[in-house]
Image (tube, helix red, strand yellow):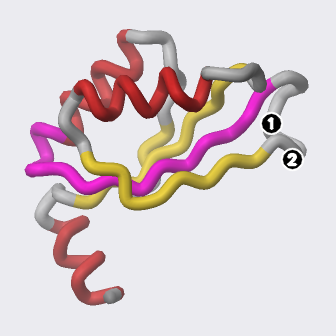
Amino acid sequence: MQVTRHGLTAAGRYLILRTCVPDRPGELLALLQLVAAERVNVVSVSHRREGVLIGLGETEIELTLSTRDEAHCEGLLAAMRGRGYAVERLS
């Protein structure tokens, strides 16, 4: 699995990112709808409400995604930033 993941990452087809959303009902859904609208496949979702770097009333979301290529990754990141998400690319 690690070799596959490394190959997909090197090819720009595997994207891991982190962002924060308000800790309110529907915010994770809105984020995932944006990802779906960009035709990106969700591999996994992790969210944390507690932590030193997580603000009060926020939830940190880490997404592992499968994309077509590097341009697709960049398109998603641009769309997220355009909707006001502060995005940190982890891979």
Q: Residue at x 61, y 42 (%)?
A: 61
Q: Residue at x 38, y 60 (%)?
A: 43
Mark 2: secondary structure: loop
- Horizontally, residue 41 falls left or right of residue 33, namely left
Q: Are marks 1 and 2 in contact (CB under 8 Å)?
A: yes
Image x and y of residue 63, in percent: 47, 49
Say above or below: 85 vs 72.
above
Image x and y of residue 82, in percent: 36, 11
Say above or below: 42 vs 57.
below
Q: Residue at x 40, y 18 (%)?
A: 81
Badge 2: few (under 14), some or many (20 or more) residues near its Cα, within 10 Å?
Answer: few
Is residue 63 in the magenta section?
A: yes
Q: Which residue is mark 1?
A: 54
The type of residue carrying mark 2 is: Gly
Q: Which residue is mark 2?
A: 51
Image x and y of residue 73, in percent: 22, 41
